[in-house]
Amino acid sequence: MKNVQFSAASLAAQAMGWIDPVTKAVVPPIHMASTYLRDEDNTYSSSGRVYARADNPTFDQAEATLAALEGGPKALIFSSGMSAASACFLALSPGDHVVVPKIMYWALRNWLATFATHWGLKVDFVDAESNDAIAAAVQPGRTKLVWLETPANPTWGVSDIAAVAEMAHKAGALLGVDSTVATPVLTRPLELGADIVMHSATKYLNGHSDIIAGALVTAREDAYWTRLRTIRAQLGTILGQTEAWLLMRGMRTLFPRVQWACRSAQSLAERFAAHPMIAEVLYPGLPSFAGHAAAARQMKGGFGGMLSVRVKGGERAAIATAARVGLWKRATSLGGVESLIEHRASIEGSGTPCPPDLLRLSVGVEDAGDLHDDLDQALRRAHNA
């Protein structure tokens, strides 16, 4: 957009104001080509493109928009959140030490505990809500990456990004932040000192539960970023062209979707905090929540659309409650326009740190009153069963 400073919400809504130069369409085309023509001198100097495993014009708009939203110079989109996150660790070397949260996305946690350690990384799992625990784990000169997920799935604990960035950098390490739940609508980790921001773009960035995608945004174009680009190209973890187009489509409504979900989640958290069949509500927007103060410092405009409830009566009551909802959908994932409910411990299986009485709630864009009433009746029916 021409020499004018627009808000991030406006940039997202208009996809940076991009117009197709040939047709003048306000919606970009999908470029399906897998390969590109060489120039007469046998180079690719006129187009800069060689092969679609490295890049594709359809990626350009999504990457440029996400980089602008996060305040970084460059972004990369990947075939999944796991491929984006694992690339951050694969860009290190065997023997390198990393510090990661005990509570985090289960698939990445499991990958770090199995593949990454077998490959040669030294992994310490710590309480990432505690600055002291992180400081004790970081080893100056040896730790190469500190990884945070905030709010952390599925208990929504909050890490202090700015404080941890200072610790990591003092020790010579990078800081990576999984900001899937916060999104750039609420938190911009690069402004707080992070070096890399990761998103499972399947979730809020896309917002329609119709693609699998991941993304990274960097604070600078350095050697580490070059390794990430190389890993994506060499491992072929590139996003498909249609999926890249759908990701950009979803990001155009990111702000209103996240803002709506935040308002509804706050309302539901406050109402269910006093519910007779709920033992505890886990949500950063509640003043009673342990991470509320840190969340208030680094989450602007809301506390996210994710919350969890711990059901009185334990695991059996929690599963019975999920079985009796109507409007909420029993499904894995989060960040879509539809509201989802899931008994997380049974999904994660043996070794999960998730409490067995916990139900994870992803709040969509339905009427908040309807969502409350549906879960309320499910709790009461399960209690009386």
Image (cartoon, rainbow, N blue to C red):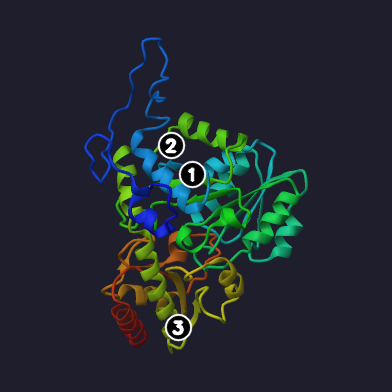
Q: CA distance from mark 1 to mark 2?
A: 8 Å
Give yes or no for contact between labels 1 and 3 (Cβ–Cβ under 8 Å): no
**Label 2 Cα neighbours within 10 Å, binned few <14 / some 14-19 / many ≥20:** many
In the displayed structure, 106 sits above or below 363; it is above
Residue 95 position in % (x across, y down)? 70, 38
Furthest residue to the front? 3
| Res 270 label | 3
Residue at 57 percent of width and 68 percent of height: 157
Left or right: where does residue 93 sit relative to residue 367?
A: right
Left or right: where does residue 5 sit relative to residue 178?
A: left
Residue nearer the viewer, 96 or 168:
168
**Residue at disc 3, secondary structure:** helix
**Residue at disc 2, secondary structure:** loop
The type of residue carrying mark 3 is Glu
| Res 237 label | 2
Give yes or no for contact between labels 1 and 2 (Cβ–Cβ under 8 Å): yes
Q: Which residue is mark 1?
A: 84
